[in-house]
């Protein structure tokens, strides 16, 4: 049984990681004149450096190498590297969206992501869905369906945000890849790509010419590594249901920041009906996750 102290520590870790991820959502604004794509590229490099430092300090290199030795066949290696471009695309979208007028679209995608994961768990892994989870999924589907009927489609950014991570998690789960090992390999494989992007777009010269990047870039890497570490701490200390409920704090913060800081209006991301149905689904999901603690 988890102790009260563990629950408090896990809750603080989860809330703190949500605030850090929210700050990173706005990092593109602080790092002008770098483009969103250049900021995403720098984030990959800074995350890799921070993660290497973290793995070194926690002496986990042997765990990384031990897992890699278990990959024997070509098929296993293909499944191991397939998620990498998915993560690269998600990192790019998270940094590119807010500075290009798609902050609300990204936020909506993250609101929908847990619902998508629940539905995938039901149909791919035959996991049980409670009545409240079914009700939440139906509410979200009605909201999305209305916008598709009204406007002919939903934002590609929203679709990419909520549909990109599920195959990433499914592929990682298939090989039971440890989180640190998976992320370290992803960032390592992405490094040559982002180096070429920064070189061809002038991202190195822009960063070198402005002294603010000398502290903003390391700060971006530190925030990324710390947020990731806090998320792992929270997942290890909290019950799954409580951890899932707290995961909604991040998209809530992103929503507020999109409206207040990025000055987006609600109708830029979708109809009021869709937002209403997604909000209803959100509260149903939180109630379902928290019912054992009320």
Image (tube, helix red, strand yellow):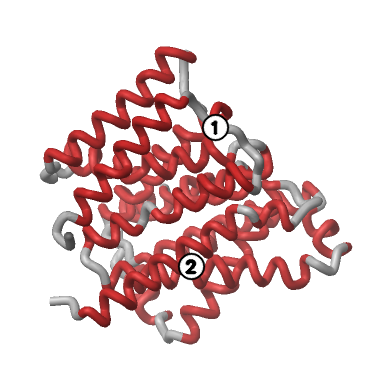
Q: Give the residue drawn at x 38%, y 75%.
A: 65
Q: Give the residue drawn at x 48%, y 67%.
A: 227
Residue 248 image position (x, y, % from top left): 37, 52
Q: Nearer the viewer, mark 1 or mark 2?
A: 1
Quadrant for residue 24, please give it: bottom right
Residue 164 image position (x, y, % from top left): 42, 41
For this view, does 32 lie left or right of residue 234? Answer: right
For this view, does 45 lie left or right of residue 6? Answer: right
Residue 111 image position (x, y, % from top left): 40, 43
Residue 52 lies, with reference to residue 14, above or below; the image says: below
Quadrant for residue 274, please give it: top left
Q: Which mark is residue 201?
A: none
Circle 2 sits on which residue?
A: 227
Q: Give the residue drawn at x 56%, y 55%.
A: 190
Residue 30 lies, with reference to residue 11, above or below; the image says: above
Q: Nearer the viewer, residue 228 or 275?
A: 275
Q: Give the residue drawn at x 29%, y 56%.
A: 244
From this viewpoint, is residue 243 visible?
yes
For this view, does 284 lie left or right of residue 47? Answer: left
Q: Nearer the viewer, residue 294 or 131?
A: 294
For this view, does 183 lie left or right of residue 74? Answer: right
Local crowd at mark 2 within 10 Å, few (<14), some, or many (≥20)? many
Secondary element at tag 1: helix
Quadrant for residue 249, please give it: bottom left
Circle 1 sits on which residue?
A: 266
Secondary element at tag 2: helix
Residue 181 image position (x, y, % from top left): 40, 68
Residue 264 lies, with reference to residue 57, above or below; the image says: above
Q: Nearer the viewer, residue 230 or 289?
A: 289
Nearest to N terminus: mark 1 or mark 2: 2
């Amino acid at each position: 049984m988890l102790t009260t102290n563990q629950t408090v520590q896990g809750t603080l870790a989860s809330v703190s990681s949500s605030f850090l991820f929210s700050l990173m959502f706005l990092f593109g604004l602080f790092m002008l004149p770098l483009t969103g794509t250049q900021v995403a590229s720098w984030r990959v490099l800074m995350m890799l450096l921070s993660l290497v430092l973290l793995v070194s300090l926690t002496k986990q290199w042997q765990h990384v190498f031990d897992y890699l030795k278990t990959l024997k066949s070509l098929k296993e290696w293909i499944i191991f590297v397939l998620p990498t471009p998915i993560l690269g695309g998600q990192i790019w979208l998270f940094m590119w969206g807010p500075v290009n007028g798609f902050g609300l679209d990204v936020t909506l995608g993250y609101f929908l992501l847990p619902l998508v994961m629940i539905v995938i768990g039901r149909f791919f892994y035959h996991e049980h869905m409670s009545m409240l989870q079914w009700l939440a999924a139906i509410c979200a589907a009605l909201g999305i369906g209305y916008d598709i009927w009204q406007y002919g489609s939903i934002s590609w950014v929203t679709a990419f945000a909520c549909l990109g991570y599920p195959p990433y998690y499914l592929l990682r789960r298939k090989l039971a890849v440890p989180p640190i090992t998976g992320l370290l390999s992803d960032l390592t494989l992405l490094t040559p790509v982002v180096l070429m992007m920064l070189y061809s777009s002038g991202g190195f010269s822009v960063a070198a010419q402005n002294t603010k990047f000398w502290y903003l870039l390391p700060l971006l890497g530190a925030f990324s590594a710390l947020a990731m570490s806090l998320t792992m701490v929270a997942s290890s200390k909290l019950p799954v249901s409580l951890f899932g409920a707290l995961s909604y704090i991040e998209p809530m913060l992103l929503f507020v920041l999109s409206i207040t800081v990025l000055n987006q209006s609600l109708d830029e991301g979708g109809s009021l009906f869709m937002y209403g149905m997604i909000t209803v689904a959100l509260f149903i999901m939180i109630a379902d996750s928290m019912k054992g603690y009320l």
